[in-house]
Image (spheres, rainbow, N blue to C red):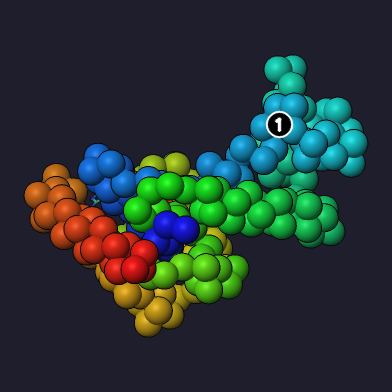
Amino acid sequence: MSYIVGVTGGIGSGKSTIVDLFAELGAEIIDADIIAREVVAKGTPLLAEIAAHFGETILLDSGELNRQALRQIVFERPQEKAWLNNLLHPAIRREMLHQLAQSQAPYVLWVVPLLIENDLMEFCDRVLVVDVLPETQLLRASKRDQNKIALIQNIMTSQVSREKRLSVADDVVDNEPELSQNLPYLQQKVLELHHQYLQLAKEKEK
Ligand code: ATP
């Protein structure tokens, strides 16, 4: 079993940005958001269940899930949101744990936005938090997605607080400074963590 580093951080904190730097060093990444898309990809049993429940109109002409339509339904109807979560959450969790168990890499970065909220820390050997101020989250997330500030604020309220996240972190990457000025620092920090995780992975094997 690989050494598992859970990577988390609030919306817009920079998880993908930091994980990309690890990937450049050859680290293996298992990303909850990617798995969440894979389990409902075209042709999967789960997508068939969703289409049976909501009707074929939930599919695009290509046979893929119409995410926009699904988002609208679950936004308007809480029972449907619960139905969907009951279907998807166990499947996503099962697939993530399966992929973690299959990994041959010395260590895996397991990127999970809701690692703490969904009680997944027990599966981690270590937790890395990407940290920025809440106002920076708001600024960067709204700039990226042209999302309404209120929507991002809602998501932030549904996530654990910055304090809670920091209290469970073994390692913290401070992503507050502007990337354009801070890239060398981040690369150095990531390189140090990479070596540290390789070392910890070796010790776990013993
Ligand atoms: P989410 O959980 O919302 O998907 P995330 O934590 O993966 O987000 P990123 O997508 O990496 O966050 O970053 C959010 C946005 O902020 C992106 O547009 C990214 O380019 C930008 N960004 C990340 N880090 C910095 C930084 N240090 N300076 C400026 N912009 C940044």
Q: Amino acid at mark 1?
A: Leu
Q: Residue at x 43, y 47 (%)?
A: 104
Helix, strand or loop at mark 1: loop
Q: Which residue is mark 1?
A: 65
> In the image, is residue 190 above or below residue 117?
above
Which residue in the rendered view is the most extreme toward the top?
A: 61
Tell me which corner region of the image, top left, top right, bottom left or bottom right, holds residue 81.
bottom right
Residue 201 in the image: x percent, y percent? 32, 62
- Residue 185 lies left or right of residue 32; in this view the side is left
Q: Nearer the viewer, residue 16 or 95?
A: 95
- Can residue 17 be seen in the rendering of this structure? no
Q: Is residue 82 visible?
A: yes
Question: Relative to 168, is 28 above or below?
Answer: above
Which of the pair 31/15 is nearer the observer?
31
Residue at 70% x, 27% y is: 42
129 relative position to 190: left or right: right
**Label 1 neighbourhood size at 10 Å, few (<14), some (14-19), many (20+)?**
many
Question: Residue visible at 70% across and 17% down?
Answer: 62
Task: Give the quarter of the image for residue 169.
Answer: bottom left
* Residue 170: image location, x then y, percent: 32, 75
Task: Work out which quarter of the rendered image holds the C terminus and state it.
Answer: bottom left
Residue 131 percent coordinates (x, y):
31, 66
Furthest residue in direction front, as rendered: 206
